[in-house]
Image (cartoon, rainbow, N blue to C red):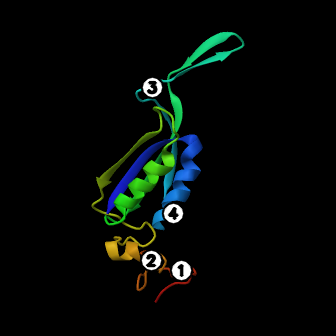
Amino acid sequence: MTKIEAVVIRERVETVIDAVEAETGHVGVTVVEAIGHGRQRGVTHEYRGRVFESRFLPKALLTFVVNDSLAPAVVTAIADAARSGHESGDGLVWTSPVENVTHHRTGLPLTEGQALNRDRPLTGTIPPSGLSVDGREIA
């Protein structure tokens, strides 16, 4: 599996998420608000005749964990949707390998095959607490 992280301008977050879902069908994402700067090193504002310099700009960090076969399409969708047309400041996207993914609820590892069948629930699993899904004790 592959973890894809992208830093995008906040105005493009919904656009990027919608593009990834439309082009690849992948729906899982984590969004973290962030601040930072790249080559543009911030911006200068003028307010009531005074000049203010904002060194750090508002951004968002998006994280997707996808199957290896889906990663190139997700990266392309992110890069295309995040592009604002400005000379700089649109952000970055990068990937890294993921070795182990485990469900908190079941304690079982997620395999590539299960990730491909994400619409189907995991079958044959018993929660570690000994309780069934509806809260009754399992004998």
Q: Residues within 10 Å of mark 4 (few under 14, many from 20)?
A: some
Lower sequence index among marks 4 and 3: 4
User: 55 or 138, which is in the foreground?
Assistant: 55
Q: Residues within 10 Å of mark 1 (few under 14, many from 20)?
A: few
Rendered image: mark on residue 23? none
Look at the numbered discs 1 and 2 and tell me whether their residues touch, using CB distance below 8 Å.
yes
Amino acid type at mark 2: Pro
In the rendered structure, find residue 40 and report the number of the disc placed on it: 3
Q: Secondary structure at mark 2?
A: loop
Label 3 is placed on what type of residue? Gln
List the single residue furthest toward the top: 49
SS of the residue under disc 4? helix
For disc 2, the marked residue is 127
Q: Nearer the viewer, mark 4 or mark 1?
A: 4
Residue highlighted by disc 1: 133
Residue at image mark 4: 21
Between discs 4 and 1, the one toward the N terminus = 4
Determine the residue located farthest toward the right in the rendered image.
48
Q: Amino acid at mark 4?
A: Glu
Judged by depth in the image, the label closer to the viewer, 3 or 1, is 3
Mark 1 / mark 2, whichever is N-terminal: 2
Mark 3 packing: few (<14 Cα in 10 Å), some, or many (20+)?
few
Front of the two marks 2 and 3: 3
- Mark 3 and mark 1 lie on one chain; the one further toward the N terminus is 3
